[in-house]
Amino acid sequence: MACADWFVVLPDSASAARVGAALRGPAVQEVSHPSGRPWLLGSWASRDMAVGEAGRVRIAVVGDHATTAGRLTAAARRTDTLAGLDALAGSLVGSVHLAASVAGCVRVQGTVTGLRRVFHARIGDVTVAADRADVLAGLLDAEVDEQRLAVHLLNTSGLHPVTGEPVWRGVHALPPRHYLALDPDGQRPRAVGWWSPPEPVVPMAEGAHALRDALAAAVEARVRGRDVVSCDLGGLDSTSVCSLAARDGAKVVAYTAEGLDPMGDDVTWARRTVTALGGVEHHVIPGDRLPMVYEGLGDVDDRFDEPCPVAVQRDRWMAIPRLATSRGSRLHLTGFGGDELLAGSPAHLHALMRTRPRTALQRVRGFAAQRPWPYRETLRQLWDNSTYRAWLARVGEQLTAVPPPLETPTLDWGTPPRMPPWATPDAVDAVRELIRSAARGAEPLAPTRGQHVELEAMGSTSRMVRQLGQMAARIGLGLAAPYYDDRVLEAGLSVRPQDRITPWRYKPLIVEAMRGIVPDESLTRHTKDGGDQEVEAGLRENRGALLALCDDSRLARLGLIDADALREVCARPLPPALQFDALYQTVACEMWLRARESVTIPG
């Protein structure tokens, strides 16, 4: 089976039952409709599932949660429509998929950020939903959509609504903030909006308390009942999660990876934290014992439902999970998502300028001095009132332009992405066509630029964390990222931007939220280790493996890249104008195509 962990949701019809029969096997579990037909089935060995039912209503929650069958049964008694489940969905702690059958109609949804995704496709004469696009593609015997694959060559994974769509013909992604509604016959699937970002009006003191409660509940839901858990322990985000886990009774085993940068201080701060907490088992992995970026490319056999940029450093990412499982951990807590939520986006200053101009100008001056930002471009972005559609249309015309300088202000709807110089004109045209088409009707993820940028960043990075979780699941380890939980996200986004985002304090919201939990000294940290040196060293040491990918390139076969141009770039250090992400994305696409050649998907 291609995927060790997946599920499929079927409408209540005889035709859907036939689809279910095609998926049955010794590793497949199933939950039936009150009608007796199969409804929710799959292989979820690494998932926790709770089911409740009353009358013609059945509700299932799958993922990281503390929900009980009794609570779901009580909710089922109160529910008579799909929309009636909004209150339950808006109260669940953790990271889950919610699936429900109400009088024959079906509702299925993932998380707001997309860490848990929902896809759907028409199989025969019914619409079927799943949490993996490749499972549906296997049922459809679908081919790769080359135009959608070309989008993955962009030097960013975040360009709403263009990125994030499945690369399979006939398979569709449920939009963020929606649930999928299926009628009993599965003929008329509908994406129904149910979640909106909160108004950012909560003062710091109140918001810090709410974030503390939400993050603590998220960690407790995962740690409760476990004898041992493992944690990343690096920056302030993972330090907060580790400190919360240390309060909840389980033995905590923390890991810190030492970087190659002699100025990096993750290890120093981690040791201070462990000393102050007491009782945490701490392991430091020396930088020279960690695999390099691009190491082991020839051995990567993970089969994702889309190209995974993290796969270019799979061995490096998996070093800590492998150590954690050998220590007995079956759950690993991370700080992924903290940067997007807690550091926030200066783009909030665009809206703040229109409501509190004096405060906004003070913040702008601070950011402009730190970054530094050119004042002319800063003022242009600040006063520009272009809609998201207009900005997206401009993006489509600039795909091959010179990348914006690193000191470009970040007050716009986003950073305009670029296609790599080795992309063919056909690939550029294909991506441009998709962007132009999307721009005609695109709506931002939030009314203001700041919240839109934050939600888009969380959406794009959570997709990579989702794939990291799939890597870890293969060795029996669950990967948890509490900052991507809906309740944690809501608590963070509710805080006033003038309190949360400032050039003069480092992540002030988490600092205030974690007082009394994270050791006081650790809360004074205002640095974060980078990884540029590891990338440059990995490129030098694994140049041969990169050049080998240019030979008989699958992307070149599809007409998406010029293999000779890519080979020329890989043969020497990357030019300053070319970001590492551009090469990451291309290598990820090439590896994904090669891995798919030996795939067998049930169906």
Image (cartoon, rainbow, N blue to C red):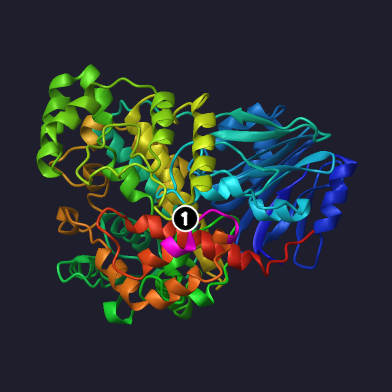
Q: Which element type, helix, strand or loop, lies under badge 1?
A: helix
Neighbour class for label 1 at 10 Å: few (<14), some, many (≥20)?
A: some
Q: Is residue 414 visible?
A: yes
Q: Is 560 one of the magenta-colored residues?
A: yes
The region drawn magenta spans: 557-565
Which of the pair 282/322 is nearer the observer? 322
Would you say 487 lies left or right of 535 here?
A: right
Question: In x, y percent, where is residue 285?
Answer: 31, 77
Q: Which residue is mark 1?
A: 464
Which of the pair 110/602 is nearer the observer? 602
Residue depicted at 23% across the width and 52% down the height = 516
Q: Is 570 one of the magenta-colored residues?
A: no
Would you say 405 lies left or right of 361 here?
A: right
Residue depicted at 34% across the width and 49% down the height = 338
Which of the pair 592/576 is nearer the observer? 576
Question: In x, y percent, where is residue 27?
Answer: 75, 66
Quadrant location, the C terminus:
bottom right
Quadrant location, the N terminus:
bottom right
Above or below for 232 versus 14: below
The single residue placed furthest to the top in the displayed view is 355
Amino acid type, callout 1:
Met
Would you say 582 lies left or right of 530 here?
A: right
Residue depicted at 46% across the width and 52% down the height = 423
Q: Is residue 94 visible?
A: no
Would you say 501 lies left or right of 118 here?
A: left
Q: Quadrant of residue 243?
A: bottom left
In this rendering, the count of numbered labels is 1
Question: In x, y percent, where is residue 172?
Answer: 65, 41
